[in-house]
Amino acid sequence: MAVGAYIANELDREVQVTDPSQVFFVQQGDGVIRVLTALEAQGIIRSGVLSRLSMVLRGDTFSVKPGEYRLRRGETLHTLLQRFNDNDVVVYSVTIPEGVTFQWMLERLWRHPQVTRTLSTANDKAIGSLIAPQISPEGLFLPETYLISRGTSDIEVLRQARAAMERELQQLWRERDPSIPLIEPYEALILASIIEKETGLGSERPEIGGVFTRRIKKGMRLQTDPTVIYGLGSDFDGNLKRSHLRDDTNPYNTYRISGLPPTPIALPGKAALIAATHPQPGETLYFVARGDGSHAFSKTLVEHEENVRRYQLNRKQNYRSSPR
């Protein structure tokens, strides 16, 4: 009996952790016996055989899940095996900021040391399947911080971000201001992406949403530079020219086309989605960058042209169009 009790207590022994950052990998296909053998080989437990006998005597069963586990000082083998069973793996964060393009997001994922790349390009067939029935992936993924385990694939992160955007968009669409001149959620997504690119100042998003909403209602063109720049793609060198604004071949040129462009132009965050579905009421129809990161809003073209002369034609040396 004494020997049996001695063996049964093996699972209650503390694991040997030499470094607080020490991790243990459970490989794909590993079972409990192989894991206990590896723990013994690494000096984390005293005996794999005794630990297995302890499980038999106590009637404990564990199903270990593959992954990376951080070892904790003071925890028992029983606790560690339970964490293997519960898949309590080490998690890492992947942050996608608001206003970036889908291509930027993909490149961020591919540079992440814990993300496994499975996609060849932004035109990979797996992406096409994920975004159906839409054709362009732009705007369809919610900027957010996602928690992943080591080895998570790029397509899995995209799947999480796609589902998160769909949840946010559908909820806000159901709660939308019924007076907005938009037909479907995708149009709200397009408008939100434009709002996102027009300002980095959160407090301005609702009013910018209001300006664009009123322009659409009145049949006015949006006339927004970010859509033109997006349509230029790699041809844009940082200098937006008058010829770009006159270009009839650019389907994103909102100086020439009426209504919204064909797709979003960036990944909009929740605040921009709210601004598109709940725009601020008012009478303003124009806005121009002041040069300090904020915008001057106006109701009439005369007021707007005065603001253009004040803030654009006489730019100060430290002029900037977005907040620091």
Image (cartoon, rainbow, N blue to C red):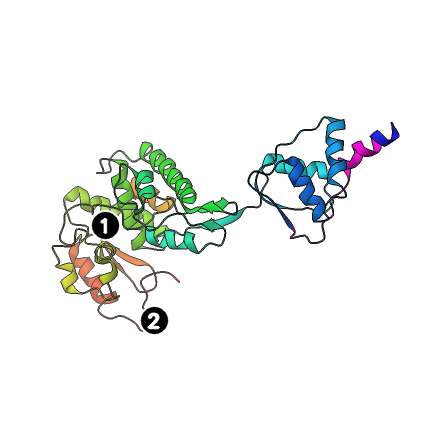
Point 24% across, 38% down: residue: 180
The answer to whether residue 211 is seen in the rendering is yes
Residue 301, position as x, y percentages in the image: 16, 56
Residue behind mark 2: 318
Pick the residue in front: 215 or 136: 136
Q: Is residue 110 left or right of residue 127?
A: right
The residue located at (65%, 39%) in the rendering is: 34
Asked if the stretch drawn in magenta spans residue 9, the answer is: yes
Q: Quadrant of residue 308?
A: bottom left
In primary-sequence order, the first of circles 2 and 1 is 1
In the rendered structure, the answer to whether residue 106 lies left or right of residue 300 reads right
Look at 17% across and 51% down and name the residue there. Answer: 251
Is residue 101 visible in the rendered image? The answer is: no
Q: Quarter of the image containing the N terminus?
A: top right
Task: Decide: is 207 above or below 171.
Answer: below
Report which quarter residue 50 is drawn in: top right
The amino acid pointed to by label 2 is Asn
At label 1, the amino acid type is: Thr
| Spatial separation of the CA atoms under disc 2 and disc 1 | 27 Å
User: For numbered disc 1, what is the local secondary structure?
Assistant: loop
Residue at label 1? 284
Q: Position of residue 145 (x, y in %)?
A: 46, 47
Disc 1: CA contacts within 10 A as few (<14), some (14-19) or many (>=20): some
Residue numbers of the magenta segment = 5-22
* Nearer to us in this view, 168 or 232: 232
Q: Residue furthest bottom?
A: 317
